[in-house]
Amino acid sequence: MIADSNSLRKSREYCARFFCDNQQYLNILFDCAFDVDYDYHYKACWILEFVADLDLSLLSPRIPDLCNALSKYSHDGALRSIGRICLLLCQKNYRSAAAVLSNDQAKIFTDVSFAWLLGDSKVATKAYAMRILALNSKTDKSVVIPLKDAIEHGYPNHSAAYKAAAKDVLRQLSRDNLLS
């Protein structure tokens, strides 16, 4: 099923619904998505992103595996989907009374997000990275200045989409009184 899926929304939604409705197969999806040596790991990541949209709590038991795989991704399609999954987890972590991520897991998300932001990732991944870092800066103030510097350094060299995300994140940091 994973190998036969494609990038069309309809295909990804169909597969995600299948895995949500048949949770006994969910570990297969996780194993494929977190194994960057699997030829179709990027397709599994696409599907996993839609699973996260349908029921983010299904990812909770596998967050440690996600953290172990984060720094290994290089496929642009996988990075974009994994970046969005990380953002969804950070948003839930910040908004819910019970923490979804441990401090160590949040630190891994922070470190990987800086790598995505400063590296050669595509704009969508960089935008997710900025937003993850902005959320994590609410509990880890040491993130604020390096994030601001990274955004300002990359600003003149990137597309309008990057600039829009950068302005949004800087506005959010300013609104939260995190910028001096």
Image (cartoon, rainbow, N blue to C red):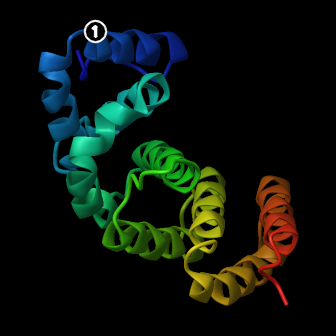
Q: Is residue 60 left or right of residue 53?
A: left
In the rendered image, the vertical position of residue 20 relative to residue 64, given as above or below: above
Give the labeled residue for mark 1. Answer: 21
In the rendered image, the vertical position of residue 115 relative to residue 67, given as above or below: below
Q: Is residue 9 left or right of residue 68?
A: right
The residue carrying pointer 1 sits among few (fewer than 14), some (14 to 19) or many (20 or more) residues within 10 Å by Cα, namely: few
How far across and how far down the image is residue 26, in percent? 19, 25
How far across and how far down the image is residue 124, in percent? 63, 50
Most extreme residue toward the front, as rendered?
97
How far across and how far down the image is residue 77, in percent? 45, 42
Q: How many marks?
A: 1
Identify the image quadrant of the N terminus: top left
Locate residue 145: give its quadrant: bottom right
Query: In this view of the protein, which residue sits in the foreground, 167 or 134?
Result: 134
Q: In what element is the residue under mark 1?
A: helix
Identify the image quadrant of the C terminus: bottom right
In the rendered image, the vertical position of residue 128 relative to residue 108, given as above or below: above
- Residue shown at the point (37%, 72%) measured from the top left: 103
- Residue shown at the point (42%, 51%) measured from the top left: 98
Q: Identify residue type, mark 1.
A: Asp
How far across and how far down the image is residue 79, in percent? 44, 51
Query: In this view of the protein, which residue sits in the foreground, 106 or 125?
Result: 106
